[in-house]
Image (cartoon, helix red, strand yellow):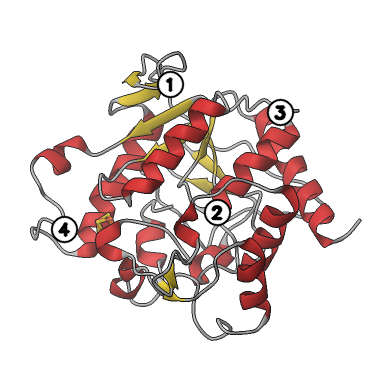
Amino acid sequence: MNHLDKLEAQSVHILREAYREFKSICMLWSIGKDSTVLLWLARKAFFGHVPIPLVHVDTHFKIPEMIQYRDDLAFKWKLTMIYGENSKAILEKNTFPDGKIDRISCCKALKSEALKNTLSGEWDRYIMDLTTGKYIPDINRDRYTGVIVGVRADEEGSRSKERYFSPRDKENDWDVGDQPPEFWNQYKTDFAPGTHVRIHPLLDWTELNIWEYIERENIPITSLYFDRGSGKRYRSLGCYPCTTPVESTATNVSEIIEELKSGKFANIAERSGRAQDKDDGGGLETLRRDGYM
Ligand code: SF4
């Protein structure tokens, strides 16, 4: 087994464990490279079929190509595709891009609050009708108790403190100092009622591993990651008012791998183009303790 085979085997094991342990489970799909690799691994774990709903929190400020890519792939792969949103904040234009609030408050409203209420079923959810490709109200209001997320420990500081199976309380809050130990592939999956558990099958993958795996498996990803003539490309995807591309002439996956191996980004954080990280003091811990992905 090479290093990618080992990472794949571990992630598939965690995905199957999670599916076995949680009655109401979903997988967050941010549309970026990591959660798309996770989706690919889920297809492998369950022999081409994904028996877990994909959930996306739509801020209405995502780069439009991201949403197009999400819907094209969901339709093609016949995924159970669900999205939720903070429609009140969006309708009232109570957002950072509308000039009403700061970035941290906006991320809390459009991401953390929307995620919390989408997962609990308290706010409306919309599900793709796989005959038309359009979204319709989701009649299922069950609370998701197992939530699979594509975060990696090397991505930024707060994520390195996660467990593979990491509990969040009723309010979606994360008590970093009180997490169960995980020895010898044994995971704690039963918690107090109301708790939900975040499951992190990609915790041990690096940015380079992700790109090597995308190349090996020929996983379709959005072209926003490639230079399309401007000498820039996105290294991390997010809302367009808060995400800037990096200087790079990489036009395909193998050029990105070469670029990463060259050490060009060795001292530049992967999420350096994400303005909300800077506004949260250079990390994301404040936001992530409150439920941010
Ligand atoms: S990334 Fe920017 S636009 Fe998106 S939720 Fe955060 S502050 Fe709002």
Residue at 8% of width from left, 58% of height from top?
A: 100
Residue at mark 2: C-beta within 8 A of ligand 1: no
Question: Are discs 4 and 2 less than 8 Å apart at CB?
Answer: no
Q: What residue type is labelled 3?
A: Gly
Question: Are discs 4 and 1 less than 8 Å apart at CB?
Answer: no
x%, y% of residue 69? 45, 41
Q: Which mark is residue 150?
A: none
Identify the residue position indicated by label 3 in the image: 48
Q: How far apart are marks 3 and 4 (CA)?
A: 40 Å
> Does label 3 or label 1 sit earlier along the sequence?
3
User: Which is in the foreground here, disc 1 or disc 2?
Assistant: 2
Q: Which amino acid does label 2 sit on?
A: Lys
Q: Which amino acid does label 4 sit on?
A: Pro
- Closer to us: 289 or 192: 289
Residue at 28% of width from left, 29% of height from top?
A: 123
Q: Which mark is residue 33?
A: 2
Q: How crowded is mark 1: few (under 14 residues within 10 Å), some or many (20 or more)?
A: few
Q: Distance between the residues labelled 4 and 1?
A: 32 Å
Identify the residue position indicated by label 4 in the image: 97
Q: What residue type is labelled 1?
A: Asp
Identify the residue position indicated by label 1 in the image: 142
x%, y% of residue 46? 73, 29
